[in-house]
Image (spheres, rainbow, N blue to C red):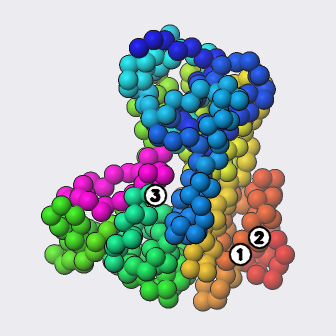
Amino acid sequence: MGMITARYLIVGGGVAGTTAAEVIRKLDPEGGIVVVSEEPHRFYSRVMLSKPQFFLGQIPFDRIWLKTEEWYLENMVTLLKGRVVVRLDPEENSVLLDDGAKIRFDKLLVATGMCSRKWGIIGAQKRCVHYLRTLDDAVGVMNAVKTARRAVIVGSGFVSFEMCEMLRLAGLEVEAIIRERYFWEPLLDEASGRMVERALEKSGIKITRNTLIDHVVGDDAVEGVAFKDGSRTTCDMIIAGIGVFCTADWVQQGGVEIGRGGVLANEYLETSRHDVWAAGDAVEYQDVVLGERTQIATWFNAQMQGRTAATNMTGKRKVFRMVSTMTAQAFGISVSFVGSPMLLAGRQAVYRGDPAGNSFIKFVLKGKELIGATLINRSEEIGALVQLIERNVDVSGMLDKLADPSFDL
């Protein structure tokens, strides 16, 4: 294998990496750009993978693609699909790929995103156990529902919430099995979690709480799951939504510092190594709005980080500053997350609305400032909350107003 040289090497062909390539080309019309993608596809909409219209075949499959093959040629971006970086040599400023090819770079962007956490129990390798992270994952699920009748969804997060609706719309019986006390614990407070559960159960979803699965039942294909207490439930397909993780071994072995869940970066998205940046789901960065290190796995956050990293890679100096938001919708209920919504030690919660009603907000404060919130059917207030967080407004004197649903934020 020969040596490839590039002024800009981007590892990751998703939204962060592709956005970075696009911005770099606008700022530097000549510098060579190479994008290495572990997936065998060009840039596509990962967001669409969890949309019922796509999942049920109600819109053309080709709508998934966000860049044409011609775009890469026209913008002089070399896309290496289905290739994996196995080693980073920081002294030589090069990486080694799994096929033996070597790429030498001037500037490196780590935009690898996250991978689905693989289920470690006995029988998890059986046919009809699925994940939902990549386009190939989605195609596998779309094919499976054509013949499946009863599905088990493991976990209570974004994937589980949206997949529950899609499988019900496809006509399957669905059981959600969670190890927590309520759905989406601890990201949601209990009142909000119960609101989500009521919407699921009203639509025919069975929720089994406080339960651990011991093994998958069946020969070659899935026939059900057995619980730790010896009981069982039947199914002919499983969606394992048990979280994601960052595959950054090659980054760490190359001398780049790694945090608890991702590649460490400062407010400029620079890593601990000169000429190496990070963007997207895999970066644990210094959030200048919240004043703390954070890691956000949202499409828009990754897109904007790709823009900032690209700007800095071309020689400018720009701080990444953004309040993240995400909204998931299913079963006629919307669940939104703003900023840093976890109620960690040293933080205070203020609640707005009536959980018995149709809308509810949990505000999270650190000191005198609002730093995050979760909203159930209150997405119209996201914009106001983003401004309060972004401006570091002192809200300590208005806690009663925050708790008043009639007060205009």
Residue 244 in view: no
Please say if the residues under marks 2 and 1 sit with CB atoms less than 8 Å apart.
Answer: yes
User: Label 3, on which residue?
Assistant: 138
Q: Residue 378, which numbered label? A: 1
- Quick one: 256 or 218, which is closer to the camera? 218
Whichever of callouts 2 and 3 sits on the residue coming sooner in the sequence is 3
Vertical order, 191 against 69 (above or below): below
Give the main secondary structure, helix, strand or loop, of the magenta stretch: loop
Where residue 200 appears, as percent x and y from the top left, is 49, 81
Q: Where does the magenta region start and end? A: 114-137
Where residue 264 appears, as percent x and y from the top left, is 55, 34
Label 1: element kind:
loop
Question: The residue under label 2 is which amino acid type?
Answer: Glu
Question: The residue under label 3 is which amino acid type?
Answer: Ala
**Image quarter for residue 23?**
top right
Q: CA distance from mark 2 to mark 1?
A: 6 Å
Residue 123 located within the stretch drawn in magenta? yes
Q: CA distance from mark 2 to mark 3?
A: 32 Å
Where residue 343 appears, as percent x and y from the top left, is 56, 63
- Quick one: 396 or 13, which is closer to the camera? 13
Please say if the residues under marks 3 and 1 sit with CB atoms less than 8 Å apart.
Answer: no
The residue sitting at 30% across, 63% down in the picture is: 128
**Image quarter for residue 142?**
bottom left
Vertical order, 84 against 363 (above or below): above
Whichever of callouts 3 and 1 sits on the residue coming sooner in the sequence is 3
Residue 239 located within the stretch drawn in magenta? no
The residue sitting at 71% across, 29% down in the picture is: 75
Question: Does residue 284 appear left or right of residue 303 in this picture?
Answer: left
Label 2: element kind:
helix
Quadrant the C terminus occupies: bottom right
Q: CA distance from mark 3 to mark 1?
A: 30 Å
